[in-house]
Image: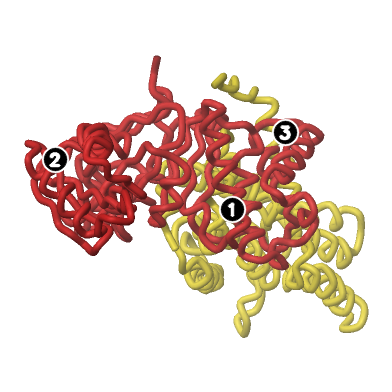
Chain colours: A red, B yellow
Amino acid sequence: MTAPVAVHGVRKLFGQVRALDELDLELGPGVTGLLGPNGSGKSTLIKLIAGQLRPDAGVVRLWGRDPFTCPEVFADLGICPEQDRFYEDLRGRELVAALTRLQGFSAADARARADRALERVGMATYADKRMREMSRGMRQRTKFAQAIAHDPALVLLDEPLSGTDPIARADLIALIRELGDEGRCVLVSSHVLHEVESMTREVVVIRHGRLRAQGDITRLRTLLDDRPYRIRLGLTPSDAATAPEADVRRLAAALLGRAQIKAATIVDASALEITTTDLDAACLEIPALARDLGIALASFTSPDADLESLYRYLIQR
Amino acid sequence: MERRSPPSRRALTQATIAWAGLHLRRTLRRRGALLALVVLPIAAALLRWVADAPSASAARILLVYPTPLLALFFASGALREEIEDRTLTYPFTRPVPRSWLYYARLAAHLGPLLLAVVPSLALVAGDLGELVRFTLTAAAASLAYGAIFALFGALSRSASWIGLGFLIWEHGALRVPGFVQDLSLLTYVHGLAGVSVDIGFLGLLGADLPGVARALAVLLGVAVVATALGGRLVERREIALER
C-alpha cells in the first residue's frame, strides 16, 4: 500500500541556503513528532508536503501523487499552518465553513462539519466571534478546526500549540492523540519536547535540513549505543540498624561487578547513579539484585531515556 | 483510515463560486469600496447635470481617469492581498485548482469596480444608444484593466507602482497619433465609447480611433489573456512563500 507521505532525496534551496538536503522520509498512520531547532527545515518540509513549495531535487508524494501539481490530494489533507494569520473580518464559524466548503462539500454539509469541528476543539461557544476579536488560543483552536473539519486522512500541524493556555494545550494534545488513534497520519512540528512526547513516541528529528533520526524514541535511544544511559536509583533504608549510605555502597559494589554497568556514582546517602550500555538488562537485573541484597528501591529513573535527552544528543552530535 | 473520494468537478465549481461570493461580500464591506460606490455616481451626476458637461465629455472623463484608477485599487489586491496577509495557505491546500481560486478572487475584486463604474457611465448617457455603448465600454474597460492589474499583483509586491507606471504609459501613448496610440488600451476605450481623444491644447483626436468591434475585441482579448496568464502563473509559482 502506498504511504500517505513519501519524501525521497528532497533538496530545497532558498538562494544559497539549503533548507532541506537529501531528505528521505516516509510517514504512515499515527502521530509523528517533527523535531528540530529553529531554522532546521521543519516548516519547509511541511510546506513541501502541503504542496506550497516545489523541491529543487527529489520527490514529494502524497499517496503516490505530487501535491504541487495534483490538488486532488488535498481532499484528504488538513493543515494547521504556523502563521497566526486569518481573514480577520470573518467569524470563526464562517471561516471554518467557507474553507470546508472549498473541500467540495455542499453549503449545509460544510456548516454542519464546521460546527462539529469547532465543538471538537472546544470553540463552539466562541465560534461567532470575529477572528480579530479572538484570543491567540481561540485563534489557534479555530485554525485547528479548519484543518480537521473535512475528516482528512493526513493532518499537518505546524506548531499547533503555540499561544495556547495550559487547558487548551491539554485538550489539543488529547485531540491530536485521538486523531492518531483514529488511524490518521498526523505530523506535528514542535520544539516543545515534552509536548511532543505526550502526543507520540514516534519522532522525526531534522537538523540543517538533514534527517538525523526517525522512529520510536526508545528504539532510537537504543540504537545510540555509543552513548550509555544513566540510571538514578533512590533507596529506602532496609532496616533501622543499617545506615542508608551502607546500602548505597553495597549496591554500588554489587552493580560494578556486572558487565553492562560502566560506572556507579554515589549521589548522596540515599541515591546512586549508574551508567549502563544496556538499559533493558539493567531494568531487569537491578531490582532483582537489590532484592537479593535486602535493599528496597524507592525510585528507578533514567534521565537519558526521555525525548529531551535524545533530542539534545542528536542535535549536538 | 478510509480515504475520501475526490470531490466532483461540479462540487468544486460550486465551491469556487461560493468562495468568490464570500470575498465579494468582504470587498463590498470595505470603506474604500463603499466610498467608490457612492462617490463615483455622485461625481457622474455632478458632471452631467451641475457642470452641464456634454455626455461624451463626461463619459470620457469617467472612462479615462477613475475607471483605470479604481481597477488598479481593486484588482491589484486580488491575489496580492492574500500573499501579503499570508492567508493563501488556507485556500491553496484545498482540492480546487489554484487558477480557479485566482479567478474567484479576481471576480470578487472586479465586482465592486463594475458596480461603481457601470452605473456611473449609465448616468451620463444622453440616449439609449449612448447608454448601451457607455455601459459596455465601462464593463470592458474594467475587465481589461482589472485583469492586467490583478496579473501585476500576482507577479510583484510592487503591483501598485507598476500599475501607476502602466497608467502613465497609457496616457502618454494615447496622445501620440499613429501606431504608438494603438498600444494604449485607452485608445480602444475611446473607440468603443465613441468619444474623441482629448489631447489638450491640440484639441480632439477622433478620426483614427478603432471601430466598436475591434475595440471590444481588443479589450476583451486583453482581459482573457491577462486572466489566463495570471491563472497559469498561480498554478506554476511557489506563491505562498512570499511575505
Q: Nearer the viewer, mark 2 or mark 1?
A: 2
Disc 3 marks a residue whose amino acid type is Gln
Read off the residue under disc 2: A277
Disc 2 marks a residue whose amino acid type is Thr
Residue A28 visible in the picture: yes
Q: At x 35% / y 49%, what residue is drawn?
A: A299
Q: Chain of mark 2?
A: A
Read off the residue under disc 3: B14
Given the current orientation, which residue lies at the most extreme front position?
Answer: A241
Q: At x 82% / y 75%, what residue is drawn?
A: B39
Q: Position of residue B202 (x, y in %)?
A: 60, 81
Q: Quarter-wise, where is residue B78 in the image?
A: bottom right
Label 3 crowd bin: few (<14), some (14–19), many (20+), radius 10 Å? some
Q: Nearer the viewer, mark 2 or mark 3?
A: 2
Camera-nearest residue between B183 and A136:
A136
Q: Position of residue A277 (x, y in %)?
A: 13, 40
Q: At x 20% / y 50%, what residue is drawn?
A: A230
Q: Are marks 2 and 3 on the same chain?
A: no
Find numbered disc 1 in the image and state the secondary structure of the residue it sits on: helix
Find numbered disc 3 in the image and state the secondary structure of the residue it sits on: helix
Read off the residue under disc 1: B147
Q: Is residue B183 above or below residue B91?
A: below
Mark with earlier residue (1, 3):
3
Q: Position of residue A18 (x, y in %)?
A: 22, 53
Please report contact status of discs 2 and 3: CB closer than 8 Å, yes or no.
no
Find numbered disc 2 in the image and state the secondary structure of the residue it sits on: loop
Camera-nearest residue between B152 and A299:
A299
